[in-house]
Amino acid sequence: MMLHIPQVLNAQQLAQIRAALERADWTDGTATVGAQGAKVKHNRQLPEQSPTAMALGKIVQAALHKHPLFFAATLPKKISPPLFNAYAGGEHYGLHVDGAVRALPDGQASMRTDVSSTLFLSAPQDYDGGQLVVFDTYGSHEVKLPAGDLIVYPASSLHRVEAVTRGLRLCSFFWTQSMVRQDAQRSMLFELDQHISAVRSKLGDTPEVLGLTAHYHNLLRQWVEP
C-alpha cells in the first residue's frame, strides 16, 4: 500500500527543522547504505548520532505518534529514528531497494523494515526535480509532496530519487516494522478501518458498525505478530 499522509508537521515545526538543517554539517549519504546502494546514492545526510539529527528526529517521532492515519496505515511495532537528507546541484539516488533488516542505534536490537516513509520538508516549488519514484505491480508512481506531508510505501518496493536540478530538497526518512508483516493484510485492515470510521460518523455505533469493528479486531488478532 502506498499512502499520502498530509500535514504530519505544522508550519512552526517545519520552520524549526529547516532552520536547524541550514546550520547542520552534512556528510556523504553513502555512509548509511550497503555496497549496492553506495553505487547509486549521491546525496548528503546528517550523521545518525549527531545531536541535530537526534533532536529533530524527536520532533518527527512526536508528530507521528499523534497522527491517527499513520498509525492506522502502518500499525507500527518499531519505528527507526528518523534520518535527514539533502539533495541539490544534480544530486540523486538511483534505483534501489531498502535493506530488509536495520540495526537500531542502541546496538542491542534490530528491526525488520516493512514500511518505508519519506517526510517532505521543502516546498515543491522551491526545487526542480527530486521526485521520489516508486515502482510496484501497477507501474511507477512519482511523488513530490507539500512540505510537512508524508508518503508511506512497502519497503520491498524498488524506488529512486530523481536529480535535483534547482534549489534544495530536504527530507526526513525512516522505516517501520509493522505488527502485521504482510502488506496486503495491512491494506485490507486499513481500508476496513477507514470505512468503519466513515460509517460511524454518519450512523453512530449501530449494531452493524459494532459488528464490523469486531471483525476488524478479530482479523487483527489473527495477523498481529507479537
Image: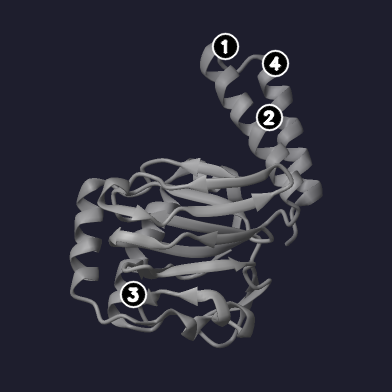
Going from the N terminus, do you reach mark 3 or mark 1 first?
3
Write down the residue under mark 2: 213
Going from the N terminus, do you reach mark 4 or mark 2 first?
4
Write down the residue under mark 3: 53
Asked if residue 77 can be seen in this view, the reply is: no
Residue 220, position in %: x, y?
Answer: 73, 44
Write down the residue under mark 4: 207
Amino acid type for the residue under numbered disc 2: Thr
Amino acid type for the residue under numbered disc 1: Leu
Q: Residue at x 33, y 75 (%)?
A: 53
Q: Nearer the viewer, mark 4 or mark 3?
A: 3
Q: Nearer the viewer, mark 4 or mark 2?
A: 2
- Checking the image for residue 203, the label placed there is 1
Residue 14, position in %: x, y?
Answer: 25, 54
- Checking the image for residue 160, the label placed there is none
- Binning the other alpha carbons within 10 Å of mark 3 as few (below 14), some (14 to 19) or many (20 upward) gives many
Q: Residue at x 32, y 67 (%)?
A: 88
Amino acid type for the residue under numbered disc 3: Ala
Element type at mark 3: helix
Amino acid type for the residue under numbered disc 4: Pro
